[in-house]
Amino acid sequence: MDAATRPVIDVRGLTKRYGDRIVVDHFDMQVPRGRIYGFLGPNGSGKTTTIRMLCGLLTPDEGEGTCLGYDIRRESQLIKRQVGYMTQKFGLYEDLSIEENLAFIARIYEIPNRNVKVGETLERLGLASRRTQLAGSLSGGWKQRLALAGCLLHEPQLLLLDEPTAGVDPKARREFWDQLHELAAAGLTVLVSTHYMDEAERCHELTYISYGKLLAQGSAAELIAGAGLVTCEIAGSGLVELSHALRNDPKIRTVASFGATLHVSASSQADLDAALAPYKDSGIRVITVDARLEDVFIALMQDATDNFA
C-alpha cells in the first residue's frame, strides 16, 4: 500500500488506563487521507485521551498502530513534527500579539524564511489587519482563528482539533468549517471532536465513543440508517408532563425537546404506537419524521455503560 492510499491514522486495540479506570478501551480507528473525520462522544468519553495517544503525547497501555505512517509507540517524535494539534483551551501567549505568537511557533518548528511564512499565514487566515493586536484581547472566534493559524504554520499533514469551536458564535463556527473543507480538499486530513450536531453532519465520516468504548462508525447517513430508530414529532399542550412519562416507558429509546415539539424515538413502529396509545385523546399531534443524528447519539449515549459505574 503506497502513501497515497495508506490510512493517515490506523490504530487497533488502543487502550489507556488511569488506576483501575479504563479511559479508552480497545479502540480501533482508520482515517483516510484528505477526509474530515468527526470524533463524537459525551464529556469524559475518552476523546481527548485518544487524540493525545495518536499524536504521541501519551503512550497507550495496550494497542498498536500508525499515525502518518509512523509507529505511535516508537516514532512519536516524528509524528509530532507533522501534526497540528488544537487543544480545547486557547494555548497561545495572551500577552503577545498575533504576529509575535506565530513568529514564536515558527522558531520552535525551525521554519525556513519564517517571516515570509508568518506573513503568508496571516493573509491566508484573514489575520493580517490584526497582526499587532494582543492575543488576550481577541474574541473567541478570533482566538480560534489564531490557534488554527498556529497549527497550520509548519504545513502539517494531519490536523487534530479537540472541540475547537466551543464557545464560538455560529457565524465564526461556519467560517471555521468552511476553512476545514478547503484544507481537506487540498489533501489535509482532519480529525475533529465536537458536540455540535450541525458540525458532525459536515464531516465525511464519524466515530462515536462513549465511556472509552467505540459504539459506532460511518457517515451520518449510515449511522442514522443503522440505528434503526422510528421517530415522531409531537406537538400540543402538556408536553413537559408527556416527556416525563415517555422517558419512563421502556418501549421508548429517546425523548428530546426541539423548540415547541418533542422528538420521540423507539426501536419499532409497534413500540412507538403502544407507548403513545394512552395519550392519543389528549389533544397531541403526532407526525412521523426521519430520525436526526442527534436522536441517534442520544440513543447511543443512553445505551452505554458509565465507566465510573
Image (cartoon, helix red, strand yellow):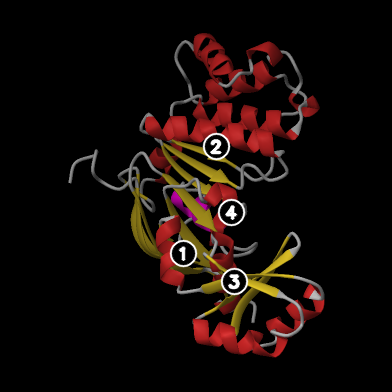
Looking at the rendered structure, the kind of residue marked 4 is: Met
Name the residue located 65 percent from the left edge and 46 percent from the top edge.
Answer: 88
Q: Are marks 2 and 4 in contact (CB under 8 Å)?
A: no
Residue 303 found in image quarter:
bottom right
Seen in the picture, residue 281 relative to 53 is either above or below; the reply is below
Name the amino acid type tagged 2.
Trp
Q: CA distance from mark 2 to mark 1?
A: 22 Å
Q: Which residue is mark 4?
A: 197
Three-letter amino acid code of the residue under disc 3: Cys
- The alpha-carbon separation of the residues under discs 4 and 1 comes to 12 Å
Q: Reply above or below: 184 against 229.
A: above
Label 3 SS? strand
What's the CA distance linking mark 3 and mark 4?
19 Å
Q: How packed is label 2: few (under 14 Cα within 10 Å), some, or many (20 or more)?
A: some
**Residues at marks 2 and 4, CA–CA distance in whole angstroms:** 13 Å
The circle on residue 232 is 3
Closer to viewer: mark 3 or mark 4: 3
Q: CA distance from mark 1 to mark 3?
A: 14 Å
Q: Which residue is the site of mark 1?
A: 224
Tell me if residue 57 comes above or below residue 27 in the rendering. above
Mark 1: which secondary structure?
Answer: helix
Residue shown at 60%/21% (left/top)? 102
Q: Residue 54: x, y in percent?
A: 45, 51
Q: Looking at the rendered structure, which numbered label has been put on residue 177?
A: 2
**Whether label 1 touches label 3, CB < 8 Å:** no
Q: Position of residue 49 (x, y in %)?
A: 55, 57
Q: Identity of the amino acid at label 1?
A: Ile
Residue range (magenta): 49-54
Q: Is residue 109 visible?
A: yes
